[in-house]
Image (cartoon, rainbow, N blue to C red):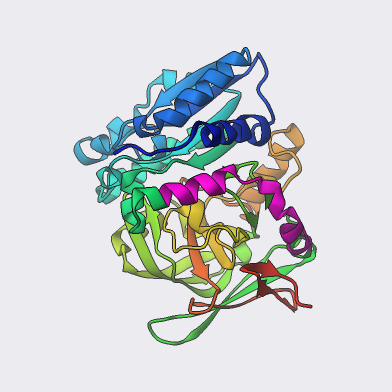
Amino acid sequence: MTVEISKEDLNKWADTLLNYSLGGILPEDVVMIKGERVAWHLISLLQDKVFSAGAVADVNIIAPDNYRGRVWGASIAKFGTAEQIRRVPEWHRTRYEALTKYIEIMGAEIPELSANLPKKTAMELAKADLPYRQLRLSKRWVITIFPTKGYADIEGMSLDRFTEIIVKASTTNPLKMKDMIEPVAQLMENSKHIRIQTEDLKTGKLLELRMDISNRKVVQCLGNLNLPDGEIFTSPDANSVEGEIFLDCPVFYDGTTIEGIFLSIKNGRIIEYNAEKGFDTLTKIVETDNGSHRIGEVALGMNSDLQPPLKQPLLLEKIGGTLHIAIGYSYKECYVENPYSNEGKSKLKELFEDKGICNLSSQHVDVVTDFRPGGAGKAVYLDDTKLEIQNDVWGLPD
């Protein structure tokens, strides 16, 4: 089943990705455009615009069983071995090294093809993909989401309704959120700690998670990295994370839905975890490597246009009035001014290897709590300031 998107909306979407999110296309650029065949309407238009700008478009069409275009799809995890997974062809690295800008279009035709992978090979697959994630993160990049019947089914929506939500959110000027985002982001940047209070909906117990965010850079997300966008994030001192949290929002990952997540964290490490749904998938995430037992991000959702319950992480984490943490990988730009300079690399090496403050992992999985009425979220404090939800987004108290 194909989607109906007007030429005007497709053009606006593509132009925003190329000229705003990626900062424009130069003749010397090599732009990788990665996505499934089902997103061809947008992929095709993007490549036409890249070639028209005198640059090179590297169109990377990924297999339907390959979750987000990793080095391998589900087949090798089901029928191959860990040794086979590690034998990534050298041309794959060459291709990623050659790109200067990167567009990933999430949109799965048959999402369930990547579900229920064997635990051992699923973890090896994540590890094999890490070097290529780091390569693309070192370039200018943006991720967007294309409406598909498979994704609409996950959300329990008609394709028309899901398309309407995605297209509207992806063609609205992301800078309109700046006035709402900036005051909260400034408070976060000037704060030393964040405290997150949630209710375990199963037991009724009030939980609290604490972490040190002092001296961290706080990133305001206004369409530069994701489209749609609208969040404020930073990466904490991974050693400082302490306490418990309940994350009630269903989140879609690797072909399955995880819901009702409980995490207990001590001395920066997840020591206990559970999920009412998708526990096996959560286990594969947490047990992947040392870093996947730790927290790499804390963020506030600030997009008031994304209202319905949504499971896709790219959308769910942006919903105004939500908070998410990420299991795994820390964002290097939150620790140093330029992560790719010699000075930045040296500082990150110290923070990661010597102090464990910055967290390296093959995983980076966002899990979300809803702080709107009826959700498990109860309160968020930046130092002693309790944030409030105003007009469906986080705000400062009057």
- How far across and how far down the image is residue 153, in percent? 31, 53
Q: Determine the image quadrant of residue 324.
A: bottom right
Along the horizontal axis of the image, is 208 left or right of 279? right
- As displayed, is residue 156 above or below residue 114? below
**Which one is in front, 116 or 1?**
1
Q: Position of residue 199 (x, y in %)?
A: 49, 81
Q: In this image, 84 relative to 7: left or right?
A: left
The residue closer to the viewer here, 381 or 5, is 5
| Res. 155 image quadrant | bottom left
Q: Position of residue 267 (x, y in %)?
A: 56, 68
Q: Is residue 131 at all visible to an observer of this figure?
A: no
Residue depicted at x 43% and y 18%: 91
Residue at image location 26% in from the left, 40% down from the top: 77
The structure residue drawn at horizontal position 56% and vertical position 23%, both measured from the top left corner, is 31
Q: Position of residue 103 (x, y in %)?
A: 53, 32
Instruction: Work out which quarter of the rendered image holds the N terminus and state it.
Output: top left
Magenta segment includes 173: yes
Any part of residue 19 in sight: yes
The residue most toward the left is: 79
* Magenta portion: prevailing SS class: helix
Q: Which residues are magenta?
A: 162-186
